[in-house]
Amino acid sequence: MSDYTEETIPGVEIIFEAVHGSQAFGLDGPDSDIDIKGIIAGPACWYHGFLEAPEQLILNKDHTLYDIRKFFRLAIEANPTALEMLWAPESCIRVCTAAAEKLLAAREKFLSLRVADSFGKYALSQLKRIKTHRRWLLQPPTSQPQRKHFELPAKPLISGDQLGAADALLASGKVSPGEVSPNFLLMLERERSYRAALKEWQQYEAWKRERNPVRAALEAKFGYDTKHALHLVRLLRMALEILTTGAVIVRRPDREELLEVKQGAWKFDDLIDYAERTQQQVQQAREKSHLPELPDKAELNLLCSEILGELLYDRKRND
């Protein structure tokens, strides 16, 4: 059962809740957090009133509940977390009401070719972090960027809003570089470079300050973030599996190999080569897949409406 009830979250009903993350994947260790995801139906005023309703409740960093409409939108977009929730191992499910059973019975309807991009997008984010952290390990920034290093005055002449607006106008073609003063363009580029360098410095400092000591030791030993590598490999493999078999395999049959990746068994160059090759395989699988281009939004919208309508009706009848 869930730790959260009508008494602790007034008017909110948890219709589905499951352990997510490493424990669901079968990749957890002694120090792994318990990550919980769930689906809720809020009070009637969320759906019939004029005030904006919350799309999710973040109870803590490891416990998130999605409003049912938000969840449907995520699943239709092939969001990995949403699809993994729908295929959660039975042993990980904490709450599953009749409404959730109706949703799970239709879970295949959410699958589409979008998984190639959605799982691939998250895999690429892992790869980007791996490369960034490796750069910080091999060539760490030595000091905070200063405006004078970019030939900028001590006080900005261009505000953040102005910088964003100028970039947007130039990118859209509404304003051409020829219509703008060369000095302004030069200042714009310097401001852009300075702010990018400052942002990276701040990210680097946060990374040093907040990273897990055990994870940091592995990163220092092998020259890259091995936990990100694990999830990079997992996401790419799951994308291939869904595209070729139509199955979302959450509890990983390749558990041992993935844990070896986490322990640094792959060399950095081999990891990058694997990622590039598998990304190509994902795109090839996309072209041959029998999955639809997009889910049937009208059908799923009707399903969401039916589930929510039944929940609200039952509540009113039981009041």
Image: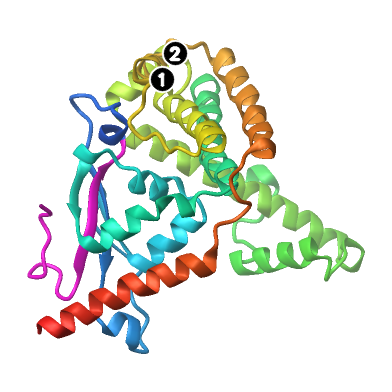
Q: Residues within 10 Å of mark 1 (few under 14, many from 20)?
A: many
Q: Which residue is mark 2?
A: 222
Residue pictured at 44% horizontal, 29% vertical: 228
Residue nearest the observer in this picture, 163 or 70? 70
Q: Which residue is mark 1?
A: 219
User: Do callouts 1 and 2 mark residues in contact (Cβ within 8 Å)?
Assistant: yes
Residue pictured at 49% horizontal, 22% vertical: 137
Q: Is residue 190 above or below residue 275?
A: below
What residue type is disc 1 on?
Glu
Label 1, label 2: how many angstroms apart (C-alpha)? 5 Å
Task: Specify whether 308 is left or right of 138.
Answer: left
Q: Is residue 236 above or below residue 109?
A: above
Q: Position of residue 276 (x, y in %)?
A: 64, 25
**Which residues are drawn in magenta?**
1-21
Looking at the rendered structure, the number of numbered marks drawn on it comes to: 2
Q: Position of residue 2 (x, y in %)?
A: 12, 54
Residue 258 highlighted magenta (yes or no): no
What residue type is disc 2 on?
Phe
Residue pictured at 33% horizontal, 87% vertical: 48
Q: Is residue 211 above or below residue 112?
A: above
Residue nearest the observer in this picture, 12 or 108? 108
Q: Overall secondary structure of the magenta stretch?
A: loop
Q: Quadrant of residue 227?
A: top left
Q: Position of residue 127 (x, y in %)?
A: 54, 31
Q: Secondary structure at mark 2?
A: helix
